[in-house]
């Protein structure tokens, strides 16, 4: 069953695997572009281990892959890109690895902020940010502030993010409004819940990409993924590159989305 979801299967995009990057770009149909793409950037550690290198090298290579994907997102005028950079469960990793990940985040922001702003990208970190180390909080605050007036790609970086933690936070926020008399229980709708998530005001992801051959959501965007199309590949994140991003987009454009209804011609 999962084979059907694999991005590198022979799929509706005929001969997609043989197309050059340029050809794939040309095949993209502007009328069928996803508005919001979410990516679980997974496989850095295995990428490094397969090369006999330290996991930290894989994380560094993962940042390079992220740079390429953001650039392509800007080129194709994507509206929302959400990347899973650090989960609420990733604290379970050895302290050294957590430190490396935080260092890379800080380095990424300071190195990339000028170019991101030049490309009109608005950075929107989402997660329990106050639990991040001080240096990461400072970098994140700078990224938010420097990019807050940008009107192009909204770049959600999920940091210390968990879908369950996000929903729990929403319940607390809504509960407090009820306590203060600002909201009645009967007024809680799906829209009210969505409005209290980190993605408030944004469309749900149209496409979720997970590299690395694992078939799970790992606590990512549990509410928002209700009708998202999945695209999976065995390629590890550091090798993902522009080509796989384009393959995923082309494949998405041939999907039939029904949202529980029927398709009418
Ligand atoms: C993704 O790569 C990066 C983070 C989770 C922060 P991993 O570090 O999970 O790589 P694998 O899954 O062990 O290969
Ligand atoms: C998901 O990957 C989190 C990020 C990519 C940041 P994990 O490597 O943490 O997920 P599991 O443990 O394989 O489910
Ligand atoms: Mg992983």
Image: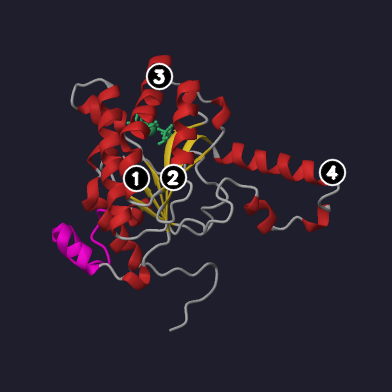
Q: Position of residue 145 (x, y in %)?
A: 48, 40
Q: Position of residue 27 (x, y in %)?
A: 22, 68
> Ligand 3 is located in which of the four quadrants?
top left
Identify the residue under disc 1: 116
Identify the residue under disc 3: 99
Marks 3 and 2 sit apart, C-alpha to C-alpha, by 25 Å
Q: Which of disc 2 and disc 4 is earlier in sequence?
A: 2
Quadrant of the image for the N terminus?
Answer: bottom left
Q: Are marks 1 and 3 in contact (CB under 8 Å)?
A: no
Scheme of image coloration: secondary structure
- Tell me where the magenta segment starts and ends, as one range: 7-27
Q: Which element type, helix, strand or loop, lies under badge 2?
A: helix
Closer mark to the observer between disc 1 and disc 3: 1
The answer to whether residue 36 is above or below residue 85 is below
Identify the residue under disc 2: 147
Q: Which element type, helix, strand or loop, lies under badge 4?
A: loop
Marks 4 and 1 sit apart, C-alpha to C-alpha, by 40 Å
Q: Are marks 1 and 2 in contact (CB under 8 Å)?
A: yes
């Amino acid at each position: 069953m999962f084979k059907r979801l694999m991005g590198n299967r022979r799929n509706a995009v005929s001969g997609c695997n043989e197309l050059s990057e340029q050809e794939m770009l040309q095949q993209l149909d502007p009328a069928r572009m996803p508005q919001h793409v979410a990516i679980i950037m997974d496989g850095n550690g295995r990428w490094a281990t397969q090369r006999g290198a330290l996991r930290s090298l894989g994380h560094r290579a993962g940042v390079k892959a992220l740079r390429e994907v953001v650039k392509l997102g800007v080129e194709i005028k994507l509206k929302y890109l959400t990347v899973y950079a650090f989960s609420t469960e990733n604290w379970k990793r050895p302290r050294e690895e957590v430190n490396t990940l935080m260092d890379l985040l800080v380095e990424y922001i300071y190195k990339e902020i000028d170019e991101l702003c030049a490309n009109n990208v608005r950075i929107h970190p989402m997660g329990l940010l106050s639990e991040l180390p001080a240096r990461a909080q400072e970098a994140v605050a700078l990224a938010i502030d420097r990019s807050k007036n940008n009107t192009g790609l909204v770049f959600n970086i999920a940091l210390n993010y968990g879908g369950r933690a996000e929903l729990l936070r929403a319940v607390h926020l809504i509960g407090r409004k009820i306590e203060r008399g600002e909201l009645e229980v009967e007024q809680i709708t799906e829209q009210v819940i969505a409005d209290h998530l980190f993605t408030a005001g944004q469309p749900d992801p149209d496409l979720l990409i997970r590299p690395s051959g694992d078939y799970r959501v790992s606590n990512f965007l549990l509410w928002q993924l209700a009708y998202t199309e999945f695209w999976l590949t065995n390629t590890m994140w550091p090798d993902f590159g522009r080509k796989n991003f384009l393959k995923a987009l082309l494949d998405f454009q041939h999907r039939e989305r029904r949202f529980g209804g029927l398709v009418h011609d």
